[in-house]
Each structure stands twice: as C-alpha cells, then as structure tokens.
Image (spheres, helix red, strand yellow):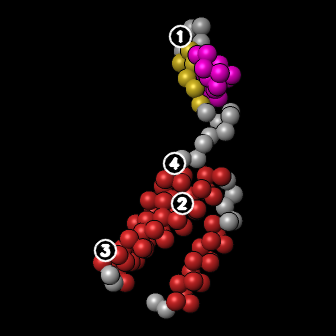
C-alpha cells in the first residue's frame, strides 16, 4: 500500500468519525482512530511486515472503539434504577435525585 492511499484512508476515517451523532459514537470513533494508529505501530514494530501492521491496526481499532464506547459517561436521567412499590413489586425506572445525591 503506498503512502498516498494510507493518508487518504486516515483522512476518510477521521471525516466519518466526525459525523457521529451521539457522544458514545464519537468516543468510539476517536478510540478506533487512536487504537488503529497505535496498533499499526506496534504491529510494525513486532512483525516488521505489512501483514503484521494490518493485523495490529485492526486489533487496535477494535479495542479502541470498545474502550471509547464503554467509557462514555451516561447523562443524568439516562441511568436506570430498580425500585419496589408498596405492594412489593419491583420495577425499573429512571433514577431519581436520591441516586445522584447518594441518599439511597
């Protein structure tokens, strides 16, 4: 793969990562970019050939996307809590202020 194609692929990936709608998608895209670049460097350092570089880039991108998505903080009101009503039934609903204040 020549250098121009590699640069074009990186620029297209960066442009698509910027089009994400939610914060989680943006963090996953950023994590994939950083992980892919780091994985490519590690793959090249370990294997010293194109195949190992591509495998490292793919593994790094996958790991970066998973970590970026998993570390996205949830906004207030998106957390779900379990409650018990006076009859003993357990139900799930968005957490109230007791959860956020630590008074549960």
Residue 28's tag is none
Please report whichever mark, 3 or 2, sits nearer to the chain's N-terminal start. 2
Q: Where does the magenta region start and end? A: 91-104
x and y percent of residue 41 in the render?
Answer: 42, 73
Residue at image position (62%, 40%) is 74
Q: Determine whether the residue tagged by mark 1 lies in a helix, strand or loop.
A: loop
Up-down relation of residue 29 to residue 74 (above or below): below
Disc 1 residue crowd, few under 14, some 14–19, many 20+, Cα 10 Å:
few
Per the rendering, the mark at residue 31 is 2
Check the picture and name the quadrant holding the C terminus.
Answer: top right
Q: Are circles 3 and 2 on residues that touch, CB within 8 Å?
A: no
Q: Earlier in the sequence, mark 1 or mark 4?
A: 4
Question: Which numbered tag is attached to residue 88?
Answer: 1
- Place of residue 60 in the rendered image (x, y in percent of width and height, measured from the top left): 43, 65
The CA span between labels 1 and 4 is 33 Å
Residue 44: quadrant of the picture:
bottom left
């Amino acid at each position: 793969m020549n250098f121009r194609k590699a640069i074009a692929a990186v620029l297209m990936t960066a442009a698509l990562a910027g089009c994400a709608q939610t914060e989680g998608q943006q963090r996953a895209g950023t994590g994939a970019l950083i992980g892919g670049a780091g994985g490519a460097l590690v793959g090249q350092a370990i294997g010293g050939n194109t195949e190992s570089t591509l495998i490292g880039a793919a593994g790094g991108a996958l790991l970066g996307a998973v970590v970026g998505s998993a570390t996205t903080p949830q906004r207030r009101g998106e957390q779900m809590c379990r409650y018990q009503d006076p009859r003993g039934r357990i139900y799930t609903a968005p957490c109230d202020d007791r959860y956020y204040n630590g008074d549960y």
